[in-house]
Image (cartoon, rainbow, N blue to C red):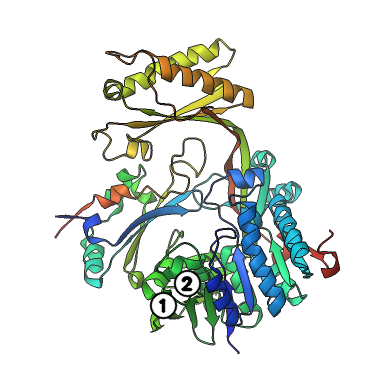
Amino acid sequence: MVKLMDIARVVRGKNAGALQLTLDVMFEDEETYRKVRDSGVLSPRLIAPLYGVTDNEVAIIPFDVAKAIKITVPRRVRSGSPGDTDVYGAQQHVPLMQIDLPD
Amino acid sequence: MPPIRLMATTGILGYGFTEEAFNAGVAMKPDLIACDAGSSDPGPHYLGSGTAFVSRAAVKRDLALMVTAGVANAIPVMIGSAGGSGSDAQVDWTLDILREICTENDLAPKVAVIRTEQSKDLLHGKLAAGKIQPLGPIGDLTDEDIDDASRIVAMMGPEAYQQALQDGADVVIAGRGTDAALFAALPLMKGADPGLSWHLAKIIECGAQVVEPREGQDCVIGTIYDDHFTVEPGHPDRRCTVTRVSAHTLYENPEPYRLKEPDGTLVTDQCRFEQVEERVVKVSGSRYEPADQYTVKLEGARPVGFRTVFVAGIRDPILIAGIDDFVKSCRQRIERDVGALGIEPADFTLSVHLYGKNAVMGELEPEADGPVHELGLLLDVLGRTEDISRAVLAKSRYAFLHTDFPGRMCISGNLAIPFSPSDMHVGAVYEFNIWHVMECDDPMECVRMEWIESEEVRSW
């Protein structure tokens, strides 16, 4: 098994507006990208508990041209509202880095 | 159609750009020099209070270079989402900076001012007519939301920019608009392909996000032809790459293939990105699907209280080992101590952030129980009034500094407080309470335009 952080080039998170968090995983080469995309490991069932949301709130969209997989989840707290810890949503990518993938 | 060239100077007015890139861009004779000043990323405070998240000095520097070159070369200069959120107060702030620039540099541009802050009467009427819907995971809008908001702006499309350009504006200072509308306006007006116009606009609106090596913000130039467009950096030593440009289509969007605009949707699933020169990327295949109904996004923020914060370090290993129980006992003590001042629990919220433990991810933290030798403590009090906020924070500081805990050896104080005064009064706090879309009968319905003639620009 390998960690996603060991085979991806970019793992980043950012607000998509004040209500949603969007996470991008990008790969250097086509082969790795396709392998991860087609492995089925990155699924709503795996992602949902990492972000405290339900399966049907997770959108996972491969974007072939950029060798990227986009994951969008609702923010649990609106950006900047009382209780938020990350107004830009820029440091919420870490749980993805630790995901195990087949070699 | 002759090629149309657009220069985006920087991702946000005030984030800066190099003069080298800017001058090289101007030498390419762009048809427009523009910059979007807006973002909702810094949070609700800026819309709520009508203030900027960049400094006045930084905006003046960027805007002065743009306006001076624009006037000298007869290139229109446009600023969208002025002041960060595009409220009337932020448009006025930007106009004041422009007046100062024009006075100091002896410039006399004709200025179009576009305002998109919305009247509450109009919004109540739209709501009653069923013309406002949630945008994403938020509840239905209520009349109370409208009344509570301190400022509400509409994100306009390209139409008002086009009218300003048609009517001969040298400089346009605009309220809230979509980032891409600022750049799509001119090519659409000149008959360029809508898919290419919107996609080019979307790619350059964040400035040097598409440039390598990435060293801060800088100018980007887009050129639109009949069946494709190109993107290149202003800076001669940098380059745009397929990786950067294609990846930018993902940036800050909930989905990469469909980007919603007021009068349609940009569709990028058939796009081709090609490295045609070392510094230049060519893009083709972008499409635009017109919408049946013209809609604008509404953004509003309402006040929720007053914030006071305090930062300190915790190094004592016995305290760190029992930190969760310690925080609990401090909370009990604080409630009791402020109760003696007549402050009820409903009058405030105290958030305790422990940096080094789980302050960033909270209960979702995957490594919550890792070893820690030092903690950053942030106390964040949100009070119903400024006085309550200050009083609760002062009691909280005292409680964390001097509350006993099992095995305590550091009996003269639990915290390393880095400076004096220790309590920071942040002021009014807001939250986004309107994040909805509104149907418009006419694209100009949500827009007000004013003109400042060139002879008035230094004196209005």
The secondary element bearing badge 1 is classed as: loop
| Residue B441 visible from this viewpoint | no
Q: Looking at this view, is B272 or B359 the one in front? A: B359
> In the rendering, at what x and y percent does residue B422 appear?
51, 27
Seen in the picture, residue B80 relative to B71 is either above or below; the reply is above
Image-based side of B49 in relation to A38, left or right: right
Q: Looking at this view, is B88 or B241 the one in front? A: B241
Q: Looking at this view, is B407 or B336 the one in front? A: B407
- Which residue is painted at 49% across and 12% down in the image? B336
> In the rendering, at what x and y percent does residue B4 appear?
59, 83
The secondary element bearing badge 2 is classed as: strand
Separation of residues labelled 1 and 2 (CA atoms): 8 Å
> In the rendering, at what x and y percent does residue A49 appear?
30, 43
- Which part of the image, by quadrant, shows the N terminus of chain B? bottom right
Q: Amino acid at mark 1?
A: Gln
Q: Amino acid at mark 2?
A: Val
Assess whether mark 2 and mark 1 are in contact (beta carbons under 8 angstroms): yes
- Which residue is painted at 73% across and 58% down in the image? B95
Residue B224, quarter of the rendered image: bottom right
Q: Which residue is mark 2?
A: B267
The residue marked by circle 2 belongs to what chain?
A: B
The residue marked by circle 1 belongs to what chain?
A: B
- Which part of the image, by quadrant, shows the C terminus of chain B? bottom right
Question: Do callouts 1 and 2 point to residues on the same chain?
Answer: yes
| Residue B109 visible from this viewpoint | yes
Q: Which residue is mark 1?
A: B270
Q: How busy is the neighbourhood of tag 1: few (under 14 within 10 Å), some, or many (20 plus)?
A: few
Q: List the single residue furthest toward the bottom.
A: B1
> In the rendering, at what x and y percent does residue A24 appear?
36, 59
Q: How busy is the neighbourhood of tag 2: few (under 14 within 10 Å), some, or many (20 plus)?
A: many
Seen in the picture, residue B385 relative to B180 is either above or below; the reply is above
